[in-house]
Amino acid sequence: MVLNEERLRSMLSRKRHTIISDYENLRLYREKLRKAYLDHSPTLTSIRAETMLQGASGAIPLEPFHRAIPLQKSFMNANEMKKWAADALDERIIIGIDGSQIYTSSDFNMPIGYVQVGSFWIHYGSNESTYDHDYLSDVYIGSEATEKQESSEPLHKMSVDQRRMTKEIELASIVVERCVEVGVPTYLMMDTPLLLRYIVWADFEVKRTMCKTMTQLLEVCKRFQVPLMGYTDYSLAKDITSTLEKFLQEELAVKVSDIAVVGPLLEEAGFGARTSVFRVQHPLLEEFYGKYRDEICFFYQKVHSDLPIRVEFPLWAFQAGRIQEIAEVIAAQTVLGDGYPYVLLRAHEAALLDAYDRNRFYDIVSWFLSKECGVPFRETAKAQRKWISII
């Protein structure tokens, strides 16, 4: 069966007017929310925002309102930007953490899964920079690779993600403790938000475990005074807009993201510009983050030609007056990484499992099970048929 292009065009044609109408409604609503942001935010205090939200999800302002807070740097060309970035990071250690996984599958007679996480860190120096990397990994096989509630089911995607995250944070804690011994300001970047809102649909146990793991990392970073920065390149979070809707007392069925509202304002202010700092309020924080329930903050920042990125960080970093440092580190890292933080790119390379790695993984596991353990390991007929072209 191939895509029936004529039928697809026909279906789209029937929805043409709805698409046009929905897009126009969203465009007008974005403009309305942006006007509300400019009109109401200057007088919005933390107390007033908390009163309006009444425990619902939203953004609580922590800084006085600004259309945009510029980086206060201007550059004539890319070389000037790179020189500024190197100077801004001088005598700082930046750590990046990322992970990869091979999900368990029912395509084999024994469930297996694998997670691998990598770290990369650089100590930037005026004359010479030094760098290093490290890995952690684990394999899950047989009963280890099945769901507790249904022992015949291979681990679901979220369960493997949970184990990957545990490894990422284990490695992050090790590297942080190692790097702070150098005695220079150290920063930890992760390619994930600190508020794990993407697990909201997971079951209670997964949410409890993953949030507990995140709070353990927050605790480590607070103890060593290492700012933890959760980097999201294209955030669909709707915290600011949820607060604005309380002013307007209306909302569309399709929610408008924060970046659609603040994006044009940061665009005007140029590279490195950020919004004011907000604290996020969310049911997941309230239920699972314990003493950190009110301590996840964020701002949006313009660091490349696309929409602003979102940076989340702990409240103590704001209270310690380290927001300008964080904004500079983020901006400088994206300059060196050509639009994406350099240490996250390198951490991703360290952790990445490509198609070749995955094939070799199955080859090694099947060889070990059959030759060393005397356990037959084979693909199901369905899996084998996937690779056969039907003529």
Image (cartoon, rainbow, N blue to C red):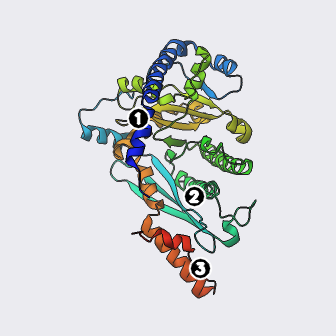
Given contact means CB atoms under 8 Å apart, are the residues at marks 1 and 2 in contact? no
Q: Which of marks 3 and 2 is nearer the N terminus?
A: 2
Q: Identity of the amino acid at label 1?
A: Ser
Residue 308 visible to an observer of this rendering: no
The residue mark sitting in front, 3 or 2, is: 3
Under circle 2, the secondary element is helix
Q: Identity of the amino acid at label 2?
A: Leu
Residue 86 screen position, x and y as percent: 34, 44
Given contact means CB atoms under 8 Å apart, are the residues at marks 3 and 2 in contact? no
Question: Mark 3 = which residue?
Answer: 377
Q: Residue placed at 63% from the left, 70% from the top?
A: 111
Q: Residue placed at 68% from the left, 27% from the top?
A: 56
Question: Mark 1 = which residue?
Answer: 13
Q: In which quarter of the image is the C terminus?
A: bottom left
Q: In which quarter of the image is the N terminus?
A: bottom left
Q: Identity of the amino acid at label 3?
A: Phe
Residue 58 screen position, x and y as percent: 62, 27
Question: Mark 2 = which residue?
Answer: 171
Query: How many other residues sit within 10 Å of disc 3, few (<14), some (14-19) or many (≥20)?
Result: some
Nearer to the camera, 359 or 16: 16
Determine the image quadrant of residue 283. Answer: top right
Residue 384 screen position, x and y as percent: 51, 73
